Image: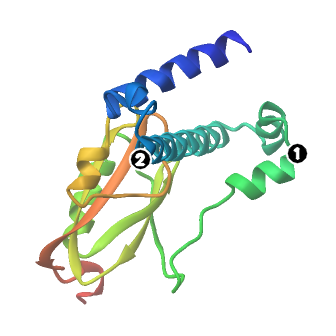
Amino acid sequence: MTENQATIRDGIATIISEIEPGIRQALDNDRDAYLRLIAVAAEIDAEAGGTLRDSVLSARAAGLSWENVGDVLDISRQAAQQRFGTPALPADGRVLRMHPVTAFDEMERLDEVGKHGWHSVGFGTLYHDLVHTDRQWEHRRVSVFGSRSALEAEGWQRIGTMWIPWAYYARPTDKPALPDPAKAS
């Protein structure tokens, strides 16, 4: 076992103990404790998988090739591209690309288009892909290194995958969308 693997295992054990206090003792005499352990391990696995996906997409946005990514993961470039390639677009395929946007103006621009029923469903370097609904939308940008479970508990939906150092969220409001100024002529 490498030093990194040992550190990861210790970290996972600490996380499990924090999420399920007393689980180590409960495993000795409570069969249901194993089900709680599985549930926590599944959450850790999902979060780690999301972090891997976000890291790969960030590497691609930084200009690294699928071959570079595949080499690090010990898989072919084709396998890396198939596993982490472009996420699916909405079923109707109608997407408006808002670009260019930067970390300095994207949230203000998302707030404005959100009032008119547009919300982000994907993003990349200098852009957000938007779809339209009949509701107003709110958007949030948070650090990928912080806890996002409180946002998700409040109905925020993660947009695409995380983009280190950011994660993006959107949620509909109870207000109807304002008329779209682009269509008001």
Identified by mark 1, the residue type is: Ser
Which type of secondary structure does the marked residue at label 2 adopt? helix
Asked whether, in this view, residue 126 is left or right of residue 114, the answer is right
Q: Position of residue 128 (x, y in %)?
A: 44, 59
Label 1: state its secondary structure: loop
In the rendered image, residue 2, in percent from the top left (x then y), is placed at 72, 13
Residue displayed at 24% across by 61% down: 155
- Can the viewer see residue 163 in this picture? no
Residue 6 in view, yes or no: yes
Left of 172 or right of it: where is 44?
A: right
Please name the amino acid that badge 2 sits on.
Asp
Label 2: few (<14), some (14–19) or many (≥20) C-alpha neighbours in 10 Å: few
Residue, x 68% and y 52% (percent of image)? 84
**Which mark is in front, 1 or 2?**
2
Seen from the viewer's position, the closer of residues 15 and 101 is 15
Residue 4 higher or lower than 170, as above or below: above
Nearest to N terminus: mark 1 or mark 2? 2
Q: Which residue is mark 1?
A: 76
Is 39 left or right of 118, judged from the image as shown? right
